[in-house]
Image (cartoon, helix red, strand yellow):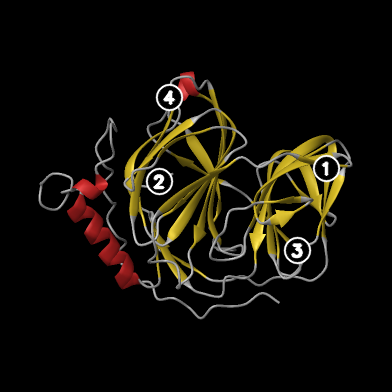
Amino acid sequence: MSNVEARPQEVVCTTSRGAGIQVLEPRDVPLGGPRAMSVRRTLPQRALSLIGAWCFLDHYGPDDVASTGGMDVPPHPHTGLATVSWLFSGEIEHRDSAGHTARIGPGALSLMTAGAGISHSERSTAQTTTLHGVQMWVALPEIARFGERSFDRYEPPVVQGEGYRAQVFLGSALGGSSPITTPTDLLGAEVVLEAGAGVTVDQPGFELGVLVDSGEVTMSGSPVPAGHLGFREAREETLVIEAGERGARVVLFGGPPFGEEIVMWWNFVGRDHDEIVEFRRAWQREIGAETGGPHRPRFDLPNDPGPALPAPELPPVRIRPRAARRSL
C-alpha cells in the first residue's frame, strides 16, 4: 500500500527504549477523496518508530466497498523495505514491476521485497464486498536493501491451543512456524482469543507489538483497547496476552531491535536525506513526471488500468539521522 499523504514528513526511525507497556493510538489517513476508504496508522509515531525491523503499520476495515469504492492504489514505488499484506476479509489484486501478479485473500501472507526498487499496484477485486486487514512494512538491513526483488505467498496452517487459535505467517511462536526466510529475525501472527483466554509469548530479546483488531486485551496486565497498538521493549521474560469478556483478535509481531537508523519518507526507506532525494528523483524520471515522457518499461504494470502515482513534494528541511538507541 502506498502512503498517500499529500505532505508526508521524513521520519528518522531508531530502535526504541522505554519501560513497561506503551499503548499507541491510531490516526486516520484517507486513501482518496472524502468518501474514500481510510486507514488507521499506528506505526511510525513520534513516540515509537520501529518494533524490531517493522517500521509501518496500516489497519483498515471492515470497509463497505459499495460505499467507499474499496482499495484503489495505482502504481507506486518502494525501496529498502518489504511489504506484508494480511487480510481478514475481502480480496486484493497485486501487480508489480518484477512481473508478479497475485490475488490476496484472508489467511494468506503476501510478502513483496522491494530491494533496490520496485513498483506495484493494489486494488480490491470486483467480488469484494467488505475489505478488512493490515499492511505492514519491514525495513531491510544494509546487507539486503539493494538485493533482488521478490514476492512470496504463504498460507499458514491454523494452530490451536487452550482458548486460542493462531496463524503464524513469519517466524515461530505459539506452536506454529513459517518457512518464509527474511534477512532479519521476524515474528508475525494472527491470534484469535476466546473470552477470558490468554496466550504466553516466549520471545527473549524481541521487541513485541500487539495490534488489537477487535475486542480488548491486556499485555502483561496493561489494557490495550480495540484499534490500538501495544508495545513491549525487548526483554527476556515472557509476554502474557489476555482477552476481555468478548474475546479478541490481534496481530502479534516483532523482532530483535533493528540496530540501524533509517530515514523513511513517502514509500521510500533510506539511510539519509540525500538517498531519499535520489529515490524520489529516480521515480519521477521513471514515470516521466519531470520530462513529460512515457513510463519506462520497468514500471509498466501489465493490464493495470491507471497511471503511476507521482511523488509528493519533499519537505523544506533536511533530516539528519540520530544515533540508534538499543532497547534494554
Q: Residue at x 59, y 38 (%)?
A: 108
Cα distance, mark 3 to mark 4? 40 Å
* Frontmost residue, 27 versus 308: 308
Q: Which of the 4 quarters of the picture holds residue 149?
A: bottom left
Q: Which residue is mark 2?
A: 2
Q: Is residue 201 above or below residue 309?
A: below
Mark identifier at residue 87: none
Vertical placement of 127 versus 210: above or below?
A: above
Q: Report the Cα–Cα distance between label 1 and label 4.
A: 33 Å
Residue 17 coordinates in the image, percent (x, y): 66, 72
The residue carrying pointer 2 sits among few (fewer than 14), some (14 to 19) or many (20 or more) residues within 10 Å by Cα, namely: some
User: Label 1 amino acid?
Assistant: Ala
Query: Where is mark 4, residue-wise?
Result: 69
Look at 49% across and 62% down and name the residue there: 139
Measure how far apart labels 2 and 4 are at the Cα level: 17 Å
Label 4: how many Cα within 10 Å (few below 14, some 14–19, many 20+): some
In this view, the residue in front, 222 or 119, is 119
Q: Secondary structure at mark 1?
A: strand
Q: Amino acid at mark 2?
A: Ser
| Nearest to N terminus: mark 3 or mark 2 | 2
- Residue at (32% x, 69% y) in the render: 275
Residue at image mark 3:
203
Question: Which residue was labeled with disc 1?
Answer: 243
* Along the line of sight, the residue nearer the viewer: 282 or 17: 282
Reply above or below: 106 against 44.
Answer: above
Viewed as shown, does residue 87 lie left or right of 317?
right
User: Is there any visible trace of residue 243 in the rendered image?
Assistant: yes
Left or right of 100: which side holds 300?
left
Q: CA distance from mark 2 to mark 1?
A: 32 Å
User: Which quadrant would the C terminus be assigned to in this image?
Assistant: bottom right
Binning the other alpha carbons within 10 Å of mark 1 as few (below 14), some (14 to 19) or many (20 upward) gives many
